[in-house]
Structure formats: C-alpha cells, structure tokens
Image: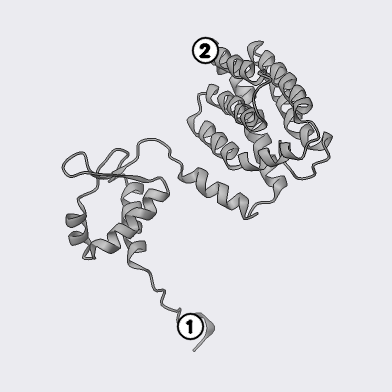
Amino acid sequence: MGGGDAWEPVQRVRTYEQVMHQIEQRILDGKLRAGDKLPSERDLSASLGISRASLREALRVLEALGIIEIRSGAGPEGGAVLVDSPGDGFVNLLKLQLALAHFDQNDVLETRVALETWSCWEAAYRANEADFTELAAILDRMDDDSITAAEFNTLDAAFHVRIADATGNALIAHMMGSLRTAIQRRMVDVYATLADWRETAKTVRSEHREILRALIDRDGDRAASLVRFHITSFYTNNNLGGLLT
C-alpha cells in the first residue's frame, strides 16, 4: 500500500468539544446571534443526546472565553445567553499568553506601536471635544502628587486606551484595551525598578500633554510620531531592554 493510501489515526473528540463546535458553527452560520438565548439545559442536552454534565462543561468553557453569559434563575431571565458586547475572555487569554512568554517582547512592543500610531493618527481627525475633555481630565489626575505608581500606571493605560476609543473603531479600542490590561502587571514591575518613578512620571506626563496637543491641533502625523517616540523611548532611556512602557 503506497504512502498516499496510509490510514490516519482516528481522533477522539471529547463530548464537550463537540457541543462547543456545534454552537460555534451556528454562530458562524448566523443561526445564533448576540443576545440570543440557548435552549434550557434539559432541552439542549436532550437534543444533543448528551448528559447535562457534559453540556455544562461546554458552557463553562464558552463562558470563560466570553462567548456566553450564564444567568442564574429560572424562566426567561435565566440560562445561557450569547453576549452582546466584548467580554474579558480575550484579555484573560492574552494575559496568560504573555505571562508564558508565548510572544517575543519585541513582537508585543511592535504590536503596541502599530496600534497606537494608527489610533493617534485617526483620533486626530475623528475625535470630538468630549474626547479631548476626557483625555485632559485623565492627565490632570496623573498630575496628582499623592497617587501611587500603580495608580499612575492605571491612568497611563486609560489615556492610551481613551485615544483608541476616540477613533470610533470599536475593535481597535477593544484590542488596545486588552493589550494594555495584559501588560499592566509588567508595567507596574517596570516602575518598581526605577530609582525615582516620580521623576520618570514627569517625562511621561509631558509627553502625554504633547500628544494631546497634537490631537487637538488635528495634526495626525505629529500625534503618531509623538506616540511612537513616547512608547519606544521609555525603555531605551531607562536601559530596560525588552521591558515595555
């Protein structure tokens, strides 16, 4: 028998994976949409010919991935519902992937630079006065000398994510928010290594103000250039190697 006629090993697929596949396929085919409620456990397990325990296992995985929400209670308000807005599933997955070093730090840095330069360029032309007001308010809170390094980093992330929000591109904003949340622990660790993080914070705040000014001036090229320098210069100037700003 020739090599092309070789038999392939039969793959054993666990029951809950088959359930997930059917639900995923219905979503992809448009038969299930955001906000739709799945049949009750009793009805769905009977239709699939599986135990309720196996069904619950599949639903727990989908809930962890942020695809469905399990609502307590009986009747129309309870049961499994497909979420209608992005959840924390992607954030949690990305956070673990980064913690396990599945991605090179330079890849993470380049991804952030790509997202943020695009966001700044677009926000310069799409943002409105309310966006500018909120960005300025974040920077004013960063000027508070009584905040901790962790609080400063939280506001730092909020500033960058708010710029992405101002583009009006929900997917970019969600990706930016997920990435910043995923690297937040690393950011706090970086600041802990600095001899005087408040001195470094002065530079960060100054660069943030310049970025906001470029956005207000509707100068996309300058805003993009400033945020690129802002991201890359932090770890270069502080001799932090692959650690991210």
Residue found 34% across the figure and 45% down from its top = 68
SS of the residue at dot 1?
loop
| Residue 162 placement (x, y as % from top left) | 56, 24
Q: Quadrant of residue 242?
A: top right
Task: Name the residue at the front extreme.
Answer: 146
Residue found 71% across the figure and 21% down from its top = 205
Mark 1 or mark 2, which has the lower sequence index?
1
Image: 53 above or below 190: below
Image check: 165 left or right of 83?
Answer: right
Q: How many marks?
A: 2
Question: Callout 1: 10 Å neighbours few (<14), some, many (20+)?
Answer: few
SS of the residue at dot 2?
helix
Residue 6, numbered circle: 1
Tag 2: amino acid: Ala
> Nearer the viewer's eye, disc 1 or disc 2?
2
Tag 1: amino acid: Ala
Image: 186 above or below 216: below
Residue found 51% across the figure and 28% down from its top = 169
| Residue 184 placement (x, y as % from top left) | 61, 39
